[in-house]
């Protein structure tokens, strides 16, 4: 039998659940909640349901969060909601504020000449829904969700056909070599890279021949290949840049039919009761140059929040570039506050070596730490109330009692702050208290 901790990353959900249940039962009681200054959050962790650079499943991320004393955790996967229920269950088990999201790409036909947050790809926008609560998606969202999954697989298969032709005699079989690397078949480019690296090692067991092969196919010096090529299959950035990104043989330029229209994505996310959110990059593209105008446009379409990856907006070596990035980040966070848009931060973890969690005490982030914690509280409050009573941020109940964005943000953040995750399983509202409005809900907290 596997040891519980290693079993947390097993590809079988039942095995992961059993392992986490045993670990929690054996663990000492949770310590007191961290003080506000010590709270740490990661609301953007990709999992094995798309790709996690450390191999983490939702259950192992929840255990990591408990082990390291995180205040809140949210998982986000590309194009699928497969990990939602496991994440929320696992967070409840370990006593950590939990939430979930889904990231995808959308097309903007009316702004197809502008680059936003997908470098080098005009008209394409990374977009995120935050606050999914599991269960069968509503009929209004299912066609879009089905399309996202199917389109991602079709794109992967098309890319494999291109790469197999170029990389011959090395080739992979998508069904046999790629699909088994994921628990639900939702492969990413990094899974393809691992499969091709493994296939090349099988074909060229001699190290010198393997290095020579990749040097030839990637157009790189032997020494450069030797430097990055380790002893086991790995999603090497050098291979990805040369083979899959713009200019690479496997790159497929997105067109109007590659991704659904932004309005369609926003509507599908909202139909699920989740918050449609723009994924801020770094303010350097032409589309992000005027963030006030961009947010005005996005809010009018139904955007209700921002997703930010802080580390790439300050943690760079060049001092002048760092200063410019931080200034743009701060200006964007100020705009979000003015507009009543919650901000959800995280590290992604979809690449080996990325941070496990941000340090909110660094000078670039400390002035906005409270805003980040409020985002985590809002997500927790929304998720609990939506899961238990269908009264989340976008519900008729919320819109009726709290018609303004700032009102809703303040209420759900207050609820999430006051409702300890350990109390979630025991907390229920009577219909009378819910019908009495937000203040009655807060007054009914344990």
Image (cartoon, rainbow, N blue to C red):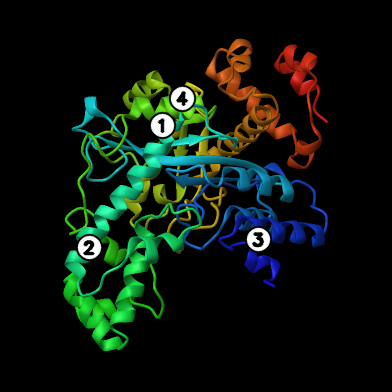
In whole angstroms, how far apart are the C-alphas of marks 4 and 2? 36 Å
Q: Would residue 257 be found to the left or right of residue 187 on screen?
A: left
In whole angstroms, how far apart are the C-alphas of marks 3 and 2? 35 Å
Q: Would residue 370 be found to the left or right of residue 279 on screen?
A: right
Q: Is residue 290 above or below residue 55?
A: above
Q: Give residue 246's mark.
A: none
Q: Is residue 237 above or below residue 61?
A: below
In whole angstroms, how far apart are the C-alphas of marks 3 and 4? 33 Å
Measuring from the top left, give residue 252's x and y in whole percent: 21, 49
Question: Which corner quadrant of the image does residue 376 belong to?
Answer: top right
Tell me, yes or no, if residue 424 can be seen here: yes
Q: Secondary structure at mark 4?
A: loop
Residue under label 2: 163
Residue under label 1: 143
Residue under label 3: 15
Q: Are there few (<14), some (14-19), or many (20+) residues within 10 Å of tag 3?
A: some
Residue under label 4: 140
Which residue is at the front of the view, 135 or 3? Answer: 135
Image point 81% across, 58% down: which residue? 25
Q: Secondary structure at mark 3?
A: helix
Q: Are there few (<14), some (14-19), or many (20+) residues within 10 Å of tag 2?
A: many
Q: Earlier in the sequence, mark 2 or mark 1?
A: 1
Q: Earlier in the sequence, mark 4 or mark 2?
A: 4
Question: Which corner quadrant of the image does residue 128 belong to?
Answer: top left
Measuring from the top left, give residue 239's x and y in whole percent: 27, 66
Q: Are there few (<14), some (14-19), or many (20+) residues within 10 Å of tag 4?
A: some
Q: Secondary structure at mark 1?
A: helix
Measuring from the top left, give residue 342's x and y in whole percent: 52, 30
Tell me, yes or no, if residue 280 can be seen here: no
Q: Would residue 326 be found to the left or right of residue 446 on screen?
A: left
């Amino acid at each position: 039998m596997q040891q519980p901790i290693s079993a947390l990353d097993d590809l079988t959900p039942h095995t992961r659940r059993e392992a986490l249940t045993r670990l929690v039962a054996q663990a000492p009681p949770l310590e007191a909640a961290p003080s506000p200054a010590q709270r740490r959050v990661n609301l953007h962790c990709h999992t094995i349901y798309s790709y996690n650079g450390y191999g983490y499943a939702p259950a192992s991320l929840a255990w990591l969060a408990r082990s390291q004393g995180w205040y809140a955790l949210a998982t986000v996967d590309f194009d699928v909601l497969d990990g939602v229920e496991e994440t929320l269950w696992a967070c409840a088990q370990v006593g950590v504020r939990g939430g979930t999201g889904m990231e995808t790409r959308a097309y903007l036909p009316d702004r197809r000449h502008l680059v936003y947050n997908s470098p080098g790809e005009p008209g394409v926008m990374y977009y995120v829904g935050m606050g999914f609560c599991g269960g069968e998606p509503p009929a209004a969202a299912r066609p879009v969700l089905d399309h996202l999954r199917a389109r991602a697989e079709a794109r992967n298969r098309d890319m494999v056909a291109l790469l197999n032709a170029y990389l011959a005699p090395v080739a992979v079989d998508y069904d046999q070599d790629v699909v088994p690397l994921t628990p639900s078949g939702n492969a990413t480019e990094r899974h393809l890279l691992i499969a091709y690296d493994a296939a090349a090692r099988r074909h060229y067991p001699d190290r010198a021949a393997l290095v020579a092969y990749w040097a030839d196919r990637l157009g790189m010096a032997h020494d450069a290949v030797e430097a990055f090529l380790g002893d086991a299959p790995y999603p090497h950035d050098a291979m990805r840049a040369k083979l899959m990104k713009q200019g690479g043989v496997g790159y497929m330029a997105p067109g109007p039919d590659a991704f659904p229209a932004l309005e369609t994505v926003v509507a599908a996310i909202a139909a699920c009761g989740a918050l449609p959110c723009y994924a801020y990059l770094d303010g350097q593209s032409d589309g992000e140059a005027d963030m006030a105008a961009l947010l005005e446009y996005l809010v009018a379409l139904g955007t209700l929040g921002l997703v930010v990856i802080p580390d790439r907006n300050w943690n760079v070596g060049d001092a002048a570039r760092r200063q410019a990035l931080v200034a743009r980040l701060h200006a964007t966070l100020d705009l979000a506050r003015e507009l009543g848009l919650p901000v959800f931060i995280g590290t992604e973890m979809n690449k080996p070596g990325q941070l496990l969690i941000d340090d909110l005490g660094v000078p670039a982030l400390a002035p906005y730490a409270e805003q980040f914690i409020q985002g985590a509280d809002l997500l927790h409050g929304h998720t609990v109330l939506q899961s238990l009573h269908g009264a989340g941020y976008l519900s008729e109940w919320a819109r009726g009692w709290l018609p303004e964005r700032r009102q809703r943000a303040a209420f759900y953040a207050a609820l999430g702050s006051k409702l300890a995750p350990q109390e979630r399983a025991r907390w229920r509202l009577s219909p009378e208290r819910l019908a009495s409005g937000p203040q009655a809900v807060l007054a009914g907290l344990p």
